[in-house]
Amino acid sequence: MPAEQATDARAKRAAGARAAAAGASCPSVTREVARRAIDAKTKPLGALGRIEDAAVRLAVLQRTLAPGVEKARVCVFAADHGIAEEGVSAYPRSVTAEMLRNFDRGGAAINAIARANRVEVEVVDVGVDAAPTALDALAHVRDAKVRRGCRNFLREAAMSESELATALAAGEAAARRAHVAGVAALGLGEMGIGNSTAAAALLSVLTGRRAEATTGRGTGVDDAGLARKRAVVDRALELHLAPSQGSAREALRRVGGLELAAIAGAAARAAALRVAVIADGFISTVAILCAAMMAAQEDAELLSALSTAVFFSHRSAEHGHARALEACGAVFGEEVRPLLDLEMRLGEGTGAALAIPILRSAAAVLGEMATFESAGISAGEHAAEHTAEHTGERITEHVAEHTTHHPAAPPAS
């Protein structure tokens, strides 16, 4: 058989497998049901390691034993920071606007990695310090600017109440756009000179940890720059910990940034819409931690949705990411483990884009692999474990009264 025909035949078989399992789409797809389904596949139990865990979570999130991540997008939220005035970055503040032009031309790392992996990129300006006319010609950058950079949090709160609300809403709007477009997995990235300092300060205020535990070199500052940066974060902790009164929302307003707020809003809305949320590195993780802590304080149902929807793409080389992951695990009530460890620390959503093929593979394993029973293969001494009580066909009968749910369909309300 020619290669083209063989490829087409495999694609048709995969489509058939997904169609056969589509009837399993319903609220009764629990972790236990999905685990039994993947244990029935033609492989030793657990042989695909954490790919199986990802498949189970996708099945629960999308309420189907045939999950899919065909359409994926990375949102890159960009903003400037008043704290950059304190000399905490190796690059000038003007680089944020210059990078927007690079994104628009398709020349940034996220553009290249996204193209290689069939991932859409949406760049959203929520607070870049540039005149509107300076960015008007950027056809591929969405304007949702709240203000031209947040304030220096050593002097005052980074944002007002209304600015925080507007930045959160910009992120929520991005998540809704993705959902309406049929996006099944949304990566959340950022760009902003000074934002690793803002993220470190936010992590410190949220956890009470000093800068030594939360603050790294970011864009690559030298030893003197790192000492200066950590002094800034410790001072922020002294100024803002008590006034925040344990409120994650207030901590975000005081020491966060416009793009961090947008990421938090996007994560919360995407999770509520059952879109997989893919955290990028340190900054993205801190913003999602803040979203989770806000949910824990304000909306338990949303916290549950976040714990199901959020996938952590990679373990960043940036100092402080391990503490952010630990804090996320504490809020979610279970250990969180990134899918990749590539010693990256760029941001832009690059790690999220690299994780998407892993999620696609996990979905394919659950939706397309044969079972021992369907393939007529002997399961030997593990026959009992490999025979799922609820395969796709049986679960269809079990929940026939439920209406089939499609993960990309817009909500009824």
Image (tube, helix red, strand yellow):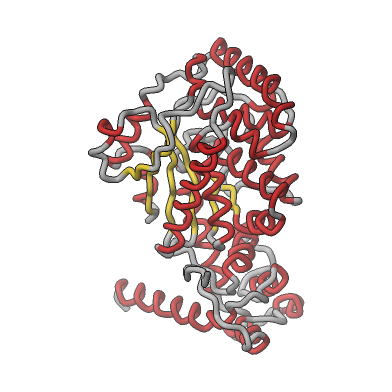
Coordinates of residue 3 in the picture (x, y in percent): 31, 72
Q: Indicate the quadrant containing the N terminus: top left, top right, bottom left or bottom right.
A: bottom left
At horizontal 43% and vertical 37% (from top left) the residue drawn is 146
Q: Can I make out residue 21 in this image?
A: no
In this rendered view, identify the residue nearer to me: 221 or 182: 182
Q: Can I make out residue 305 in this image?
A: yes
At horizontal 52% and vertical 50% (from top left) the residue drawn is 266
Coordinates of residue 39 in the picture (x, y in percent): 68, 72
At horizontal 55% and vertical 62% (from top left) the residue drawn is 273
Which residue is at the far left? 137
Coordinates of residue 82 in the picture (x, y in percent): 49, 22
Coordinates of residue 230 in the picture (x, y in percent): 62, 18
Question: On the rendered structure, is 164 left or right of 57?
Answer: left
Which residue is at the far top? 224
Relative vertical location of residue 216 with respect to residue 28 in this rendering, above or below = above
Question: On the rendered structure, is 293 left or right of 15?
Answer: right
Q: Quadrant of residue 32?
A: bottom right
In this rendered view, identify the residue nearer to me: 3 or 139: 139
In this rendered view, identify the residue nearer to me: 357 or 298: 298
